[in-house]
Image (tube, rainbow, N blue to C red):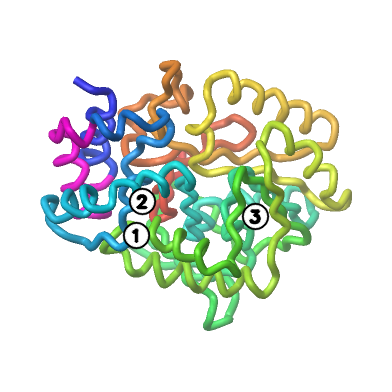
Amino acid sequence: MSGTADWYRHFGTFDAPGSSDCYARWALAAADDPELIARIDQWPHGKRQPILLFAAARYLGARVSPYPEFRGFLDAHWAEVSGTVLSRATQTNEAGRCATLLPSLALIAAAEKKPLALLEVGASAGLTLYPDRYRYEYDDGARQKRIGRADADAPVLRCADSGPVPIPERLPQVNWRAGIDLNPLDVTNPNDVAWLDALIWPEQDFRRERLHQAIAIARQDPPMLVAGDLNDKLLEVASQAPADSALVVFHSAVLGYLDAQERAQFRATMSELAATRGCHWLSNEGHMVIDQQDGSSVVPEMPEERLLGRFLLMHNGVPTAITGPHGQSLEWL
């Protein structure tokens, strides 16, 4: 059995259900389609993920449809689909993740008594660098708590919370924001915006509306985005953060794209940064974001069965919460 087929079956069984019936159907059917799996296996390992294939097809015009129609689209446009897969990456820039990061960011700002300097690695278009510009609604089933800006144009980030979540009374102040990405996306570039749109899963129009609201905010005050490898650029970019701010380095669904050696290097760099500059590290990662060719695990700190379809949020290496991958839930540990 192909490891790629297992990957698609896992996605269709655990990740997509409840979020996209279309993607669940496509993934499960693809897993049982040896000819398609053989084509996918011709791509580099990191390019074989279901989300990248599906987004590339939809970017090129594939409709939400039964699998046979989708398969026909792939046959008719395989060269273009393959070219898009090889030239693009899954740079999902989900502003909703700010809802799961906000309590930790507010705790850091309160403890440091300083404004925040935010540095995101794997920043895509930088839309999660604006936690101070959004509105939030937390709901534990018994109460709703709303915080954030009164700006009616700001997206409302809704999050189901459980456990003793330290929901702040007000938004922290941010006085610097920057991002690092291998291929930063430009919110003023129509092709990049179209790619971000294609990365939104079918049936999730609320996320698409939220994306475009967040893009409008970013266009008003574009973040500093640096192109390059996070291990090469981290210390250089971090050195530009204002000295009178609390530096927070954070990432979501990024470490899965690094192999074991690259992740070890990143951890070592974060330790160096903490010792020399002083910083906080927020890691928001899933156990099986991408199967690693070297067999290594993305999040060894938490049993896989606890995280199926969800992320683990860690502050300076200590697990603090289990989060929905698009910011839809926050379970405080």
Disc number placed over residue 80 in the picture, else none: 2
Real-space Cα distance between discs 3 and 2?
45 Å
**Kind of residue sitting beneath label 3:** Ala
Mark 1 neighbour density, 10 Å: few (under 14) some (14–19) many (20 or more): some
Left or right: residue 191 versus residue 307 is: right
State the image quarter where residue 287 is shown.
top left
Spatial separation of the CA atoms under disc 1 and disc 3? 40 Å
The quarter holding residue 143 reads bottom left
Mark 1 or mark 3, whichever is nearer to me: 1
Toward the viewer: 285 or 160?
285
The image position of residue 85, as x and y in percent, is: 41, 45
Q: Earlier in the sequence, mark 1 or mark 3?
A: 1
Q: Which residues are magenta?
A: 16-37
Label 3 belongs to which residue? 106
- Of tags 3 and 2, the one toward the viewer is 2
Q: Residue at x 24, y 49 (%)?
A: 74
Count neighbours of disc 3 (C-alpha within 10 A) and say few if under 14, some if 14 to 19, many if 20 or more.
Answer: many
Mark 3: secondary structure: helix
- Within the magenta stretch, is there residue 189? no
Percent x, y for residue 94?
48, 57
- The front one of 34 and 260 is 34
Marks 1,3: beta carbons within 8 A: no
**x, y percent for residue 167:** 54, 57
* Residue holding disc 1: 60
